[in-house]
Amino acid sequence: MLLDFRFTNFRSFRDEAVFSLAASADTTLESTHTRPTGLEKVKRILTSAAIYGANASGKSNVIRALQFMQLMVMTSNQIQPDQESTLTPFRMRPDFADHPTLFEATFLIEGVRYQYGFEMNRRQILGEWLLVYEKAKPQVWFSRTYNEKKAKYEYTYSDYFVGQKKVWEISTRKEVLFLTTAVQLNSEQLKPLYQCFAEDLVVLPDGPGVGFGFTAGYVQSAGNRERVQSVMMTADTGISSISVEKRMGRQFHLSFPGGAPEVQDAEFDVPQFGHTAGGDVYKFDIGEESAGTQILFELAGPILDILQKGRILVVDELDRSLHPLLVLKIVQMFNDPELNRNGAQLIFSTHDVSLLDGGKLRRDQVWFTEKDNEQVSHLFPLLEFSPRKGEALEKGYLSGRYGGIPILG
């Protein structure tokens, strides 16, 4: 489970932004929208959180920051020596290239809190650290800092951290994270943290449309097919059954620069949906369904898999092409303790203000982004405004009480 995430100097965010899933002391919807952690300082954690804000206010950049951190952990060892990374710092200052960017995330893994972060520029890693809270006092398992005067890295380790530390240290290039190298060279202690990034964190920065391939494979199990059918039927799509038909088609591969396209014949799993009328079932291909139905089917498999395995789903603009009631249905699945038994979490950006009222979300589940006159994005929680219980949040948000809305001329 993700406890919090913070970053500085990334895209439209110049200053530190902190996003937390720690539940407040409010007991509203506590049994459904939060889970106990077993920790002393953070007793409960949220199962979902929504980020609101005007277009170009920075909502997507919060999600991109988390995705960039994930990709660095998973693939920094693929950066070639002396090759610059794809990091995009805040650019609207003359000396933007000299400012480092920081990322830090805190996970709860098997009841133990892992606080991991790193600082970097486009050329190299400047610092990296891991704090592990097996008890109340943190253990600094490793710390890596670049000494500019000596032009070398300085490492410190905790006695709790074991393994071939010197081998991992020597093998870690300046462009690469120590975490990535150590796991690649079989550090058993760091694997759970690495797996949080590589397997448990699912980030969809381009919206909910992910293609139907995963769900098409998922429904080929009878039990999974029933689960997806249940989601589709509950959403009132008119679908009574789902099947998958294998068809031959053509795949096009383009090579750059200047390469001729290669065409290959391949077999595809094509979803078909049954609609019942007059006692007969009529089958339609996925391309014949509405955009909302297609996206719901594409999401159904990943969401059910994430709920079963207790993973973290992060989606930009969850409401894109989806009716507000379908968005609500997805949020309710994560807030349903019967469906979500393994601590899965949903983080999403949205413009769907209907979620703000009617007891759909707790007040600590709502966040906003806003851009100031210097074009700097800021991230802040609804709780900063101390809203009353039962306050009309939708009306307050649209009237500008909490910020995060466009200023229309």
Image: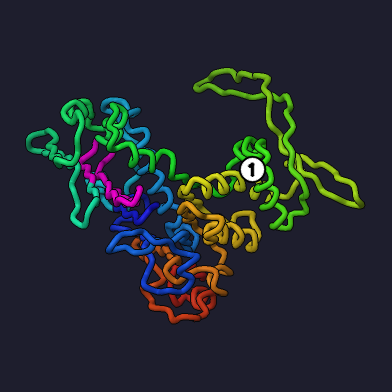
- Say whether residue 379 is left or right of residue 355: left
**Circle 1 residues within 10 Å: few <14, some 14–19, many ≥20:** some
- In the picture as drawn, the residue positioned furthest to the right comes out as 278
Q: Is 334 drawn above or below residue 88 in the view shown?
A: below
Rendering quarter of residue 79: top left
Q: Position of residue 389 (x, y in %)?
A: 46, 80
Q: Residue 210 or 297: which is nearer the viewer?
A: 297
Residue name at image x 82 percent, y 41 percent: 283
Q: Main secondary structure of the magenta part?
A: strand
The image position of residue 108, as x and y in percent, is 34, 51
**Horizontal and vertical percent position of residue 135:** 22, 54
* Residue closer to the observer: 195 or 209: 195
* Residue 23 visible (yes or no): yes
Any magenta on residue 113? Answer: yes
Q: Secondary structure at mark 1?
A: helix
* Percent of width and height locating residue 164: 19, 28
Q: Nearer the viewer, residue 385 or 231?
A: 231
Q: Which residues are magenta?
A: 103-130
Residue occupying image coordinates x 63% and y 35%: 217
- In the rendered structure, the answer to whether residue 251 lies left or right of residue 46 reads right
Q: Seen in the image, is 170 located left or right of residue 321?
A: left
Residue nearest the observer in this picture, 122 or 347: 347
| Residue 379 visible at all | no
User: Residue at label 1?
Assistant: 224
Q: Using residue 359 as the reference point, say whether residue 90 is left or right of it.
A: left
Please identify the quarter of the rendering in which residue 149 is found. Answer: top left
- Against 287, residue 134 (above or below) is below
Whether residue 310 is in magenta: the answer is no
